[in-house]
Every structure is written in structure tokens, then in C-alpha cells.
């Protein structure tokens, strides 16, 4: 369980950094992906696991290749 929490934290951190680099507000991204800002906040903080469909959608919004985005995570498993 601890390993999963670390992966969730890493994914959340990468999502937050990507959002901030694109100068997007959490509430605006949440609206685009049909999630509440609170739920997106939990994902970014590593408290919730992001569904793969959400990860793919967010990488499109943040203009990042999902494979590159997930590479570091796979390397840490």
C-alpha cells in the first residue's frame, strides 16, 4: 500500500507541476475534465488515485505525451 501511495504522490506532483507550467487554475482544469476542484486537488496531493482516462485527458490539456509523463513512474515501480 505504501508503494501505491508513493506512486499516487508522484503522479499528483507531476500533474500539479504540468498544470502550473501551463498557467492553469485547478478549478478551470477540473471543469474541463468534469471533476470537482476538490477531487482534482486530492489527486494532485496524492490522496486519490487518478484514473488512466483522466491522466490521458490531462496530458492532452497540458500538451504532454502520456508515455513520457508515465515513464518516470514506471521506472520507480
Image: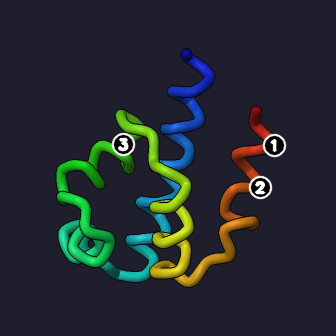
Q: CA distance from mark 1 to mark 3?
A: 20 Å
Ranked by sequence position, the earlier of labels 1 and 3 is 3
Nearest to the observer: residue 75 or residue 39: 39
Element type at marker 3? loop
Element type at marker 2? helix
Nearest to the observer: residue 9 or residue 56: 56
**Quadrant where the N terminus lies?**
top right
Residue that protrudes farthest toward the top in the picture: 1
- Disc 1 marks which residue? 75
Dots 2, 1 in contact, CB < 8 A:
yes
Check the image and report above or below for 25 versus 44.
below
Q: Tell me the residue at 54%/48% (across/down).
A: 11
- Disc 3 marks which residue? 45
- Disc 2 marks which residue? 71
Q: Tell me the residue at 29%/43% (across/down).
A: 42
Check the image and report above or below for 68 versus 65.
above
Q: CA distance from mark 2 to mark 3?
A: 20 Å
Q: Tell me the residue at 56%/84% (across/down).
A: 63
Quadrant location of residue 71? bottom right
Residue 70 location in percent, x, y?
69, 56
Q: CA distance from mark 2 to mark 1?
A: 6 Å
Instruction: Check disc 1: other Cα within 10 Å, few if <14, some if 14-19, many if 20+.
Output: few
**Quadrant where the C terminus lies?**
top right
Q: How is the image coloured?
A: rainbow
Ranked by sequence position, the earlier of labels 2 and 3 is 3
Q: Is residue 43 left or right of residue 59?
A: left
Amino acid at each position: 500500500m505504501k508503494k501505491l501511495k508513493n506512486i499516487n504522490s508522484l503522479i499528483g506532483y507531476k500533474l500539479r507541476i504540468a498544470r502550473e507550467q501551463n498557467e492553469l487554475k485547478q478549478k478551470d482544469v477540473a471543469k474541463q475534465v468534469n471533476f470537482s476542484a476538490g477531487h482534482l486537488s486530492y489527486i494532485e496531493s496524492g490522496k486519490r488515485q487518478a484514473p488512466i482516462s483522466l491522466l490521458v485527458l490531462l496530458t492532452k490539456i497540458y500538451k504532454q505525451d502520456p508515455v513520457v509523463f508515465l515513464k518516470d513512474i514506471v521506472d520507480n515501480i
